[in-house]
Structure formats: structure tokens, C-alpha cells
């Protein structure tokens, strides 16, 4: 084998980054799921120290020469793609000084920890000082990245989650959504108003809910030898491919929220658990982007989890968990899971109204990063856009308004567009599956889920970051992102 010393040294560095990142991710999971309140300041300092250590490794001056030397070495296609991902990560990190990374880690840890108690108290005024600091640091980061990449500040932040995505692309896609989505919402709400739907009668014991969630995760192929389910304030999927951590949240009076949230996070988890193990520790083995990651969670939750055939298979499991009742009939469960009703909460929204929540956040956080508005302006803009897009009055209701998501307190700005792009990709994947497997729906109804998982594994999971998002999408479905598949899916499910 021809020697590639520069590339090999880089690969060793990225393996070390992966291993330290493993510890960081588990500490972050523990911070959300287990840590006692008084541990937050010490944990924030420890996390800032780890962030600085990781940043120092990827900004080591020696890497520049190694990256340059590796370009001239005889690398195969996969290793050259891996090298390209290394260079992209190295370039982004080197724009940011270590002290900025540390300040961000401390600011977001404090803001998120305070948000946990401020949100239930509807204390927007209390959140503002911490959030202003987080936004100021995000703007500083965005300015540095934008100058290096030659893009706008908001595009620079989007690039962290969705490499290469432009505001022109988002504006086009969301602009089209704005044209037809409100009318579709009205049509579906009017149509469903004539239906009779039985509401399940609680309470629903939390231990029974947890068992149902874990049973469903097994049905969906989750490997409990390489992960676990816990509880947190805001559901998420974290950890690393060898140790994936999911969280959900339970309510005594309702169980579908925790169940469908768990199915959603299981989609993320299956992606992580099936990334190419022979490349573990290398950038090539990481998920392609956050929109592609969301396409996996929404493939599980919306495309599969709300599929009539899958729901029919869930119905007896639900009845076994909570006892027989008429509301658990498959047809009624299907109506419950596809109920369209404009509401306050994004994570509880149906798939028809959900894009409106994402458009709202995009139209607020983009001018916020660009300095056109300030944190204090958010509530009024939020109220106006909720009224316009969903006809919902949020005035004075901060906890169910701009305080509902953990993303801004955590500094995850530029992330929200990925949610709706992910829904579009998910619809496109299933359209491609049905072309390849004309009897897919009958097989799902028969409880055969392997065809879905096999297609995703071959076309999304195993390729990981070998190709750009556009190239991955072309190879999987024959075309780049085409939002028409999403519209066709919604119209078929809700008006067909």
C-alpha cells in the first residue's frame, strides 16, 4: 500500500476528536437528564473546558501543513472525501478564537439552565439578559464565519447545520409553502370538522408509557445494547453511534405525544446506529447534515409512524399497555394522529401546520442574527406571525410562545429551517421507495418494516457524509430536493 503519512496523522487526530467528543456528548446528555440543579455552574465550566480542548485540537497549527500535504498523497475516493470533510471542519474552527468558544459554552449553559425554570413561570423578562448574551455571541461567531465564507451572517450559521444552504434557497422553498399552506390548512380543518373522533381516556401510567415507548423502539429496530431511553425537559437524541441516548417526556393525561416523540427520536437514533462503522471516528462517518438527520426522524414519525398500516399494528400494543377502550381502534387512532389543528407548540404540531412554526422562527432569527431586530422585539413579532400564519393569539403567553423551544437558549440559531427541509426530504425518500417497491404500503400494513429500513440504510445511513447533500439526494431519489413531493404527500393523506 502506498504511504499516506499526512493523511494518516490527520485521521489519528480526528479519531481523538471523536473519542473526546464522546465524553462531551454523554456529559451533555447527563446535564439534561440527570444532573442536580446545583451542578450546573460546575458542569458549564467543565463543558467549556472540553469545548476549548476540542477546539485547540482542530486548530493545531500543524494541521494546516498536514492538510496541504495530504492533498498530494494517493488517496482513494472515500479517503479523499474524508479529507474534504476534515478541511471543511478545520476551516470553520480556525475562524473562531478559543476564548469565543469558551464564552459561548458558558453563556448557553447558563441561559438553558435558567430557561428550564423561567419557561414554566412565563418569565420572559428574566430570560432576556441571558438570551441577549447568547445572541451577541452568535452574531460575533456569524460575522467571523461570514467573512471567511463570503456569505451573509445568517447563512454562515446555517452552514454549521446544512453545509452550502443559502437564504435564497430557503426563501424560495418557504415562499412557495406560504402560497399554498394556509389554504391547505383551512381545507383540512374544514373537512375534519365533520368527523367524529374519540379521545382516549386517561390517566396513563408513566411506567406503562415508558414500556410502550421501549417496545415501539424495538419494533423500529433500535439496538438497546448501543443506547437507552431517558426523560428530559425537551426530547432529544444525543450520544455517539456506539452509545445513542434518547429522551422523551411524559404526561399523565396524554400518551401519544411521548409515543410519537419517541418514534421521532428513534429515527435519529437508527441513523446514528447505522453510520458506517469502518469509518467510525472520521468525518466521513458522520451524518450528512441536520436536514438529512431530520428526514430520518420524520421518516419514522410522519411517513411511517402515521401510516395507516403501521398504526393498525400499534393499536393492539396500545390497548395492551393501557387497557381496551374504543378510542384505541385503529381507525380512530389514525384520526387522532392526523388531526390538524393550529396550536401554540411546535413539537406538538401536526405535520400540516408544523411548517408554519418553522417559517415563523426563520423569519425571526434571520433578522435577529443580521442585527435588524433585537431580542426585545421577538414577542411582538412572534404574536404577529402566529396570528398571520396560524390564526393563534399568543399575546402575553411567552412560555407557549418564544420561550417554548430550547434552541435559542442553547445558541442553536440557523437550525430551524432544517426541520421543514427534513420533512420534504422524508416525503421524497418515500416517493422513491414506492417507485422502487410498488407494494411498499401493503408490506408496511403486513408488519414488514425491513424494506423501509433497508432502503434507508443503503441510500442514507451508510453513505453518511461521503457526498454533498445534493449528490446524496440525487443518488437516493434521482433528483435534488423537490418540495412537490411534500405537497403531494400532504394532499394525498389529508385530502385524498
Image: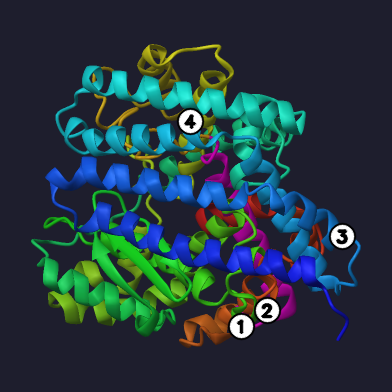
- Span shown in magenta: 414-440
Category of crowding for the residue at label 4, using alpha-carbon neighbours closer than 10 angstroms: few (below 14), some (14–19), many (at least 20): many
Asked if the residue under mark 3 is in contact with the one under mark 4, i.e. CB atoms within 8 Å, the reply is: no
| Above or below 42: residue 435 | below
* Disc 4/disc 3 C-alpha distance (Å): 40 Å
Closest to the observer, 176 or 196: 176
Residue 486 left/right relative to 342:
right
Q: Which residue is mark 2?
A: 458
Asked if the residue under mark 1 is in contact with the one under mark 3, i.e. CB atoms within 8 Å, the reply is: no
**x%, y% of residue 77?**
85, 72
| Above or below 174: residue 36 | below
Category of crowding for the residue at label 3, using alpha-carbon neighbours closer than 10 angstroms: few (below 14), some (14–19), many (at least 20): some
491 in the magenta segment:
no
**Residue at position x 59%, y 46% from top?**
161
**x%, y% of residue 440?**
61, 80
| SS assignment at label 4 | helix
Q: Which residue is mark 4?
A: 361
| SS assignment at label 2 | helix
Q: Which residue is mark 1?
A: 454
Q: Earlier in the sequence, mark 3 or mark 1?
A: 3
Q: Which residue is mark 3?
A: 71
Asked if the residue under mark 1 is in contact with the one under mark 2, i.e. CB atoms within 8 Å, the reply is: yes
Asked if the residue under mark 4 is in contact with the one under mark 2, i.e. CB atoms within 8 Å, the reply is: no
Amino acid at each position: 500500500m502506498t504511504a499516506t503519512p499526512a493523511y494518516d496523522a490527520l485521521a489519528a487526530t480526528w479519531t481523538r476528536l471523536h473519542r473526546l467528543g464522546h465524553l462531551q456528548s454523554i456529559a451533555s446528555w447527563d446535564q439534561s437528564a440527570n444532573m442536580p440543579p446545583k451542578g450546573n455552574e460546575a458542569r458549564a465550566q467543565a463543558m467549556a473546558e472540553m469545548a476549548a480542548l476540542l477546539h485547540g485540537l482542530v486548530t493545531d497549527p500543524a494541521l494546516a501543513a498536514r492538510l496541504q500535504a495530504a492533498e498530494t498523497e494517493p488517496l482513494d475516493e472515500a479517503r479523499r472525501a474524508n479529507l474534504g470533510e476534515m478541511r471543511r471542519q478545520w476551516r470553520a474552527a480556525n475562524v473562531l478564537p478559543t476564548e469565543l468558544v469558551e464564552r459561548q459554552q458558558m453563556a448557553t449553559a447558563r441561559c438553558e439552565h435558567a430557561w428550564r425554570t423561567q419557561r414554566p413561570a412565563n418569565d420572559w423578562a428574566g430570560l432576556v439578559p441571558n438570551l441577549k448574551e447568547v445572541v451577541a455571541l452568535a452574531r460575533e461567531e456569524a460575522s467571523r464565519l461570514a467573512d471567511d465564507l463570503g456569505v451573509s451572517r445568517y447563512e454562515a450559521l446555517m452552514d454549521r447545520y446544512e453545509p452550502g444552504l443559502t437564504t435564497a434557497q430557503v426563501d424560495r422553498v418557504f415562499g412557495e409553502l406560504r402560497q399554498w399552506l394556509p389554504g391547505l390548512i383551512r381545507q383540512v380543518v374544514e373537512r375534519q370538522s365533520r368527523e367524529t373522533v374519540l379521545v382516549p381516556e386517561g390517566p396513563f401510567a408513566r411506567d406503562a408509557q415508558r414500556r410502550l415507548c421501549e417496545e415501539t423502539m424495538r419494533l423500529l429496530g433500535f439496538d438497546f445494547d448501543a443506547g437507552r431511553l431517558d426523560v428530559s425537559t425537551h426530547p432529544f437524541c444525543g450520544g455517539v453511534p456506539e452509545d445513542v441516548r434518547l429522551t422523551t417526556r411524559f404526561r399523565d393525561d396524554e400518551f401519544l405525544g411521548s409515543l410519537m416523540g419517541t418514534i421521532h427520536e428513534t429515527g435519529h437514533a437508527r441513523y446514528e446506529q447505522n453510520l458506517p462503522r469502518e469509518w467510525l471516528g472520521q468525518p466521513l462517518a458522520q451524518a450528512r447534515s441536520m436536514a438529512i438527520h431530520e428526514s430520518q426522524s420524520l421518516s419514522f414519525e410522519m411517513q411511517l409512524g402515521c401510516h395507516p398500516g403501521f398504526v393498525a399494528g400499534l393499536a393492539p400494543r396500545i390497548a395492551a399497555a393501557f387497557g381496551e377502550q374504543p378510542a384505541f381502534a385503529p381507525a380512530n387512532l389514525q384520526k387522532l394522529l392526523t388531526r390538524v389543528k393550529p396550536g401554540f407548540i411546535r413539537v406538538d404540531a401536526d405535520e400540516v401546520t408544523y411548517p408554519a412554526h418553522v417559517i415563523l422562527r426563520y423569519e425571526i432569527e434571520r433578522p435577529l442574527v443580521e442585527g435588524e431586530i433585537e431580542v426585545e422585539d421577538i414577542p411582538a413579532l412572534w404574536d404577529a406571525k402566529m396570528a398571520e400564519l396560524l390564526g393563534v393569539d399568543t399575546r402575553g403567553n411567552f412560555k407557549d410562545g418564544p420561550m417554548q423551544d430550547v434552541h435559542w437558549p442553547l445558541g442553536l440559531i440557523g437550525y430551524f429551517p432544517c426541520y421543514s427541509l427534513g420533512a420534504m426530504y422524508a416525503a421524497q425518500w418515500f416517493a422513491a421507495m414506492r417507485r422502487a417497491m410498488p407494494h411498499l404500503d401493503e408490506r408496511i400494513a403486513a408488519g414488514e418494516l425491513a424494506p423501509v429500513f433497508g432502503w434507508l440504510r443503503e441510500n442514507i445511513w451508510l453513505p453518511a457524509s461521503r457526498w454533498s447533500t445534493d449528490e446524496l439526494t440525487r443518488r437516493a431519489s434521482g433528483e435534488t430536493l423537490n418540495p412537490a413531493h411534500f405537497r403531494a404527500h400532504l394532499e394525498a393523506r389529508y385530502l385524498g
